[in-house]
Image (spheres, helix red, strand yellow):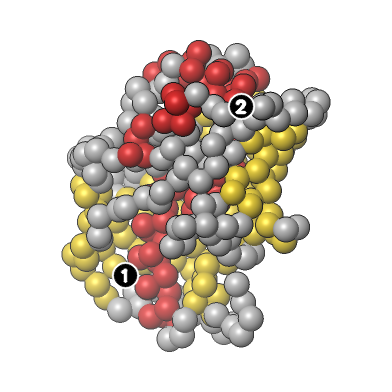
């Protein structure tokens, strides 16, 4: 069924606060009984840039809202696995993202979905084969407040232009073999505005911000291996196995392994956050595929 028409009046002050720092759905315009949903998000024009990772975050957030409503806001999905993310074009400040998700399955335990973002009918990004666990929503936020937020999003929508960007501390390289591997550290802030949205009761460093930082490392290694400027084409096998709390130091790496650029200039880079202590599996891992920048490419 279609979402309700926009209502007159402005959202309450509390809504403005909740939709300020790390929320990327302005309005849910369609919710289909078959599992599809549509929404929009206008990137504030005053930003310097809008990372591709936040476009993926916007698609994922739309899926999360639909999943939470489906289970009565008792449970909420968290990022875990993404089979593939395809990058087709850049989204720029001032653009309106047209978001779409297709929920393949959703219950109290898991959600599986795919989605995409377009700008003026031009495909910007696709998410394929996403799977995440559904956890107790009350651990992260007030379920009643989430239900109220959903009513705002399916009604008059959240206030536009509220996002002011995310300031991250600089990476510090700890080892660097040109074209092969970079190791670095990142100090996750102990406090930051985005924790108010992600999440009020249990602050978590967003997985998409972690991937954006890893993308920066991977792009440097890929450009060195290729010997030419490169752009990200897709990310595969994304796995986020644990939450990252405020105030910790992350150890990151990006490596090409034994292979450099292929005959067509494509470079595959493995990225991750190694395990800490007795953990045997990485905190996060992914494979990023880069291709040479060509004239007219996004």
Residue 118 pos. (x, y %):
69, 54
Residue 65 pos. (x, y %):
59, 29
Categorize mark 1 by other alpha carbons within 10 Å: few (<14), some (14-19), many (20+): many
Determine whether 176 is above or below 241 in the image.
Answer: below
Q: Quadrant of the C terminus?
A: bottom right
Query: Would you identify the image quadrant in which residue 223 lies?
Result: bottom left
Circle 2/circle 1 CB separation < 8 Å: no
Residue 284 pos. (x, y %):
38, 46
Determine whether 160 is above or below 88 in the image.
Answer: above
Discs 2/1, front: 2
Describe the element under mark 2 as helix, strand or loop.
loop
- Dot 2 or dot 1: first in sequence order is 2
In front of the other: 255 or 57:
57
**Which numbered disc covers residue 43?**
none
Describe the element under mark 1 as helix, strand or loop.
strand
In front of the other: 26 or 236:
26
Q: Is residue 215 left or right of residue 290?
A: left
Q: Is residue 286 left or right of residue 190?
A: right
Instruction: Name the residue rendered at 50%, 24% in the picture.
Output: 12
Instruction: Name the residue rendered at 49%, 68% in the picture.
Output: 268
Give the residue pinned by disc 1: 181
**Which numbered disc covers residue 9?**
2
Asked whether residue 123 is in view, the answer is yes
Q: Is residue 130 left or right of residue 184?
A: right
């Amino acid at each position: 069924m279609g979402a309700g028409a926009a209502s007159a009046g402005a959202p309450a002050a509390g809504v403005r606060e909740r939709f300020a720092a790390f929320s990327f759905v302005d309005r849910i315009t369609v919710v289909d009984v078959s599992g599809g949903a549509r929404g929009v998000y206008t990137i504030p024009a005053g930003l310097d840039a809008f990372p591709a990772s936040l476009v993926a975050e916007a698609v994922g957030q739309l899926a999360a809202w639909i999943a939470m409503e489906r289970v009565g806001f008792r449970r909420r999905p968290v990022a875990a696995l993404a089979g593939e993310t395809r990058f087709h074009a850049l989204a720029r400040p001032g653009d309106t993202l047209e978001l779409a998700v297709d929920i393949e399955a959703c219950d109290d335990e898991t959600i599986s979905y795919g989605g995409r973002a377009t700008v003026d009918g031009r495909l910007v990004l696709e998410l394929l084969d996403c799977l995440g666990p559904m956890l107790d929503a009350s651990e992260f936020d007030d379920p009643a407040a989430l239900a109220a937020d959903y009513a705002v999003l399916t009604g008059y929508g959240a206030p536009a232009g509220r996002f002011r960007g995310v300031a991250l501390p600089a990476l510090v390289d700890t080892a660097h073999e040109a074209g092969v591997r970079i190791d670095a550290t990142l100090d996750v802030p102990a406090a930051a505005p985005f924790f108010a949205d992600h999440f009020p009761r249990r602050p978590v460093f967003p997985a998409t911000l972690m991937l954006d930082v890893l993308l920066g490392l991977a792009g440097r290694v890929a450009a060195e291996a290729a010997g030419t400027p490169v752009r990200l084409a897709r990310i595969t096998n994304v796995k986020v196995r644990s939450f990252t709390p405020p105030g910790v130091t992350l150890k990151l790496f990006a490596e090409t392994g034994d292979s450099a650029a292929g005959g067509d200039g494509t470079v595959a880079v493995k990225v991750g956050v190694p395990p800490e202590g007795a953990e045997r599996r990485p905190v996060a891992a992914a494979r990023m595929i880069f291709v040479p920048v060509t004239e007219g490419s996004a």
